[in-house]
Amino acid sequence: MSLANFSTLVQAGANFEKLREHLSPFAPCAYCGTNGPGETNLVHFRDRRAPLHRRSERGEGKLKAIIYLVILLLIIYSAVKIVPIYVSNYQLTDKMLEQARFAVVNRYTEDQIRDNVFKIVQELELPVKRDAIKVLATNSVVKISTEYTIPVDLLFYHMDLHFSPSSENKALF
């Protein structure tokens, strides 16, 4: 309430006794009193109430910030655990496609293709056995596929990510 509104209320004959009763739990101040006959210093009462109100808001803000921080940290932790697995799967799929292209052109045998893919799997540290890599190589088509599962253990949840990358390439002639 601005000073202009306060003086307007005083001139209108407003009664501030109810306000004084409402604010009575606060201890009186030595310099607090009246601005003249029948006037109460409302600005002083408002200033004493403000810190109590701000304290409760500040606590709610801290709690909300802590909750958001915990959620953000859980998202980051989950991403650190899960994203590298998907990147490795993408790299394996890309390398399998590359091997299929080279195998058609260079006429690799199934065992040569399987060995090349298995070396890539070992470099990427994926849980794939050599026997799980399926290769079909003819003069006109090379198909490579495999399946594997990676267990992911988050703090509060356990899941298995199942991947089945495959590639195929056909000869032009």
Image (spheres, rainbow, N blue to C red):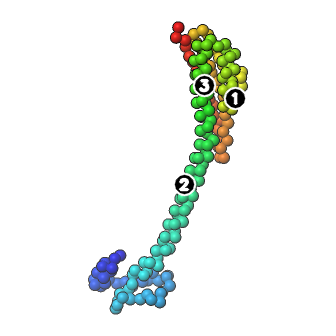
Q: Earlier in the sequence, mark 1 or mark 3?
A: 3
Q: Is residue 33 above or below residue 68?
A: below
Relative depth, front residue between 62 and 167: 167
The mark that comes first in sequence, 2 or 3, is: 2
Marks 1 and 3 sit apart, C-alpha to C-alpha, by 12 Å
Residue 18 in view of the camera: no
| Tag shown at residue 122 | 1
Which residue shows up at 54% across the image and 58% down it? 65
Q: Nearer the viewer, residue 119 or 17?
A: 119
Crowding at mark 3 (Cα within 10 Å: few <14, some 14-19, many 20+): some
> Circle 3 sits on which residue?
95
Mark number, residue 68? 2
Circle 2: element type = helix
Q: Which quadrant of the figure has residue 168?
A: top right
* Image position, residue 33 (x, y; %): 41, 89
Q: Amino acid at mark 2?
A: Tyr
Helix, strand or loop under label 1 = helix
Q: Amino acid at mark 1?
A: Gln
Place residue 2 in its image quadrant.
Answer: bottom left
Q: Is residue 58 left or right of residue 154?
A: left
What's the residue at 49%, 74% (across, down)?
51
Q: Specify few, some or many for label 1: CA neighbours under 10 Å numbering under 14, 14-19, or 20 or more.
A: few
Between the C-alphas of marks 1 and 2, the distance is 39 Å
Q: Nearer the viewer, mark 2 or mark 3?
A: 3
Q: Residues within 10 Å of mark 2 (few under 14, many from 20)?
A: few
